[in-house]
Image (cartoon, grey):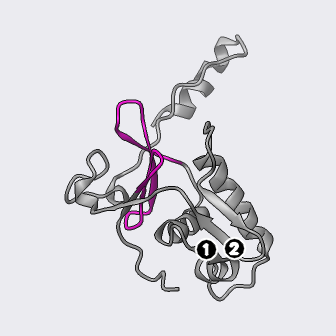
Amino acid sequence: MDTSAPTGVFLFRGFCLDRQGGGLFRVDDRGGFVPVAIRSRALDILGILVEQHGRIVSKDDIISAVWPDTIVEESNLTVQIAALRRVLDQGRREGGCIRTVVGRGYQFIAPVTRRDPNTVPGIFSAPESVADRRLSIVVLPFTNLSNDPEQDHLANGITDV
């Protein structure tokens, strides 16, 4: 199984997986896409399963692709699959996206549509991709909970840049 050149955008059950930019997005209430927090190993596994949707992918194939040249226990894969199911199946009444085929591996069973990244509105704007965007963190002012006015300088100093 060749996973050396992951490409494309895959749409499935209210999600968008960007294999080039390396992100998973959920469709929000307004039809836009918002990033989903997911660990890199789980994202790699999802990419493999989605690209092979409908086919059974063996546990050994997944492990060798996601953890190359590393000896890992099968339980690591099980943990990552469970994390994927929590994200993908959250709030769903119908069946899940990933099926376990006992003794053989896993199968991505949700319908998948492959798209060109430039045709998916709301995620990309040429030439910037998700990987090129600059992330930032906002630190809000701290509140002095001690009711001691002499400690105000500490709360103010922590957030002062």
Picture quadrant of residue 143: top right
When asked about the image quadrant of residue 106, the answer is: bottom right
Q: Position of residue 84 (x, y in %)?
A: 63, 55
Amino acid carrying mark 1 in the image:
Ile
Quadrant containing the C terminus is top left
Identify the residue at the far left of this view: 126
14 drawn magenta? yes
Left or right relative to 59: residue 109 = left
- For mark 1, does the 10 Å Cα neighbourhood hold few (<14), some (14 to 19), or many (20 or more) residues? some
Is the Cβ of the residue at disc 2 closer than 8 Å to that at disc 1? Answer: yes
Q: Secondary structure at mark 1?
A: strand
Say the numbered circle drawn on residue 66. Answer: none
- The answer to which of marks 2 and 1 sits earlier in the sequence is 1
- Badge 2 amino acid: Gly
What separation in Å lies between label 2 and label 1 (alpha carbons)? 6 Å
Does the magenta portion include 114? no
Q: Secondary structure at mark 2?
A: strand
The image shows residue 64 at horizontal and vertical percentages of: 63, 84
In the image shown, does 160 or 90 lie closer to the viewer?
90
Task: Magenta stretch: give its range.
Answer: 11-36
Question: Which residue has dot 1 on it?
Answer: 56
Q: Mark on residue 105? A: 2
Q: Is residue 150 left or right of residue 24?
A: right
- The image position of residue 62, as x and y in percent, is 63, 77
- For residue 20, what is the image quadrant? bottom left
